[in-house]
Amino acid sequence: ETGVTQTPRHLVMGMTNKKSLKCEQHLGHNAMYWYKQSAKKPLELMFVYSLEERVENNSVPSRFSPECPNSSHLFLHLHTLQPEDSALYLCASSPDLAGANTGELFFGEGSRLTVL
Amino acid sequence: AQSVAQPEDQVNVAEGNPLTVKCTYSVSGNPYLFWYVQYPNRGLQFLLKYITGDNLVKGSYGFEAEFNKSQTSFHLKKPSALVSDSALYFCAVIGSYNQGGKLIFGQGTELSVKP
């Protein structure tokens, strides 16, 4: 148990659907992250939030829309996705942004997304 | 730009033999280097890190890594592999000039340890 919980663990959606991924951390951290994991590719940093403010948007298509209503919750809203968006989406948290420098990144188990 | 390269998609080792998983990096400023491990159907778990000091760092489960500045490498090692070490291993880096939380990962190396 890492203290970072992601739901749902598996999601299948059509290209016209709208769905959301949820991440919740119980560690009292102030920074949260979304990563995309595709087979045999580097883990791709998508978004970084610090104290509920987005500090990084790594050229991610607008069909991915993050939301951070408070420091414990992070959402990734999905709409009109493409089959190539199928991947494992990982949420992580750290005490603060500097925590990324010291390796204090705690990951959830991921949400496996399949786009048909 | 920061980047990490893990040149091997897969490493196969017999149980009891030493293992090495390779990583090279490119950053601005001094590197902060990390290894994470991912077991099947799980998230990534922190294994060890190099921030400063001794070039040989020790981490969880008997793993260690050696920082080599001239070769810009941070290879992961273990003297005697276990079947339970089989997993996906990620190298990651962030530069001292980057305080924005942008920890950059490699593509992962799948380690398979056979009995």
Image (cartoon, grey):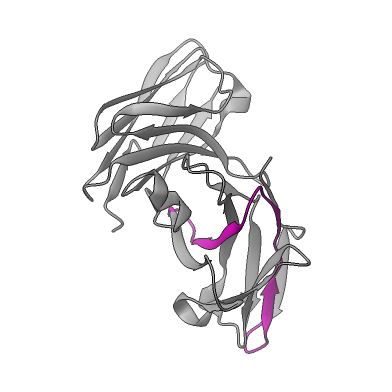
Residue A37: x and y in percent read 56, 41
Q: Residue at x 43, y 52 (%)?
A: B43
Q: Judge from the rendering whether residue B107 lies leftward or rightward of residue A63; answer left or right.
A: right
Residue A29: x and y in percent read 27, 46
Reply above or below: A22 against B51: above
Q: Judge from the rendering whether residue A105 lies leftward or rightward of residue A84; answer left or right.
A: left
Q: Judge from the rendering whether residue A18 lies leftward or rightward of residue B86; answer left or right.
A: left
Q: Residue at x 71, y 62 (%)?
A: B10
Residue B71: x and y in percent read 78, 66
Q: Judge from the rendering whether residue A11 lies leftward or rightward of residue A83; answer left or right.
A: left
* Quadrant the C terminus of chain A occupies: top right
The residue lying toward the viewer, choosing from A72 and A75, is A72
Q: Is residue A20 visible?
A: yes
Q: Is residue B5 visible?
A: no
Reply above or below: A69 against B44: above
Query: Is B25 inside the magenta-drawn segment?
Result: yes
Q: Magenta residues, as a range?
A: B14-43
Give the quadrant of residue A19. Answer: top left
Residue A60: x and y in percent read 56, 23
Query: Is B58 inside the magenta-drawn segment?
Result: no
Reply above or below: B19 against A59: below
Give the quadrant of residue B75. Answer: bottom right
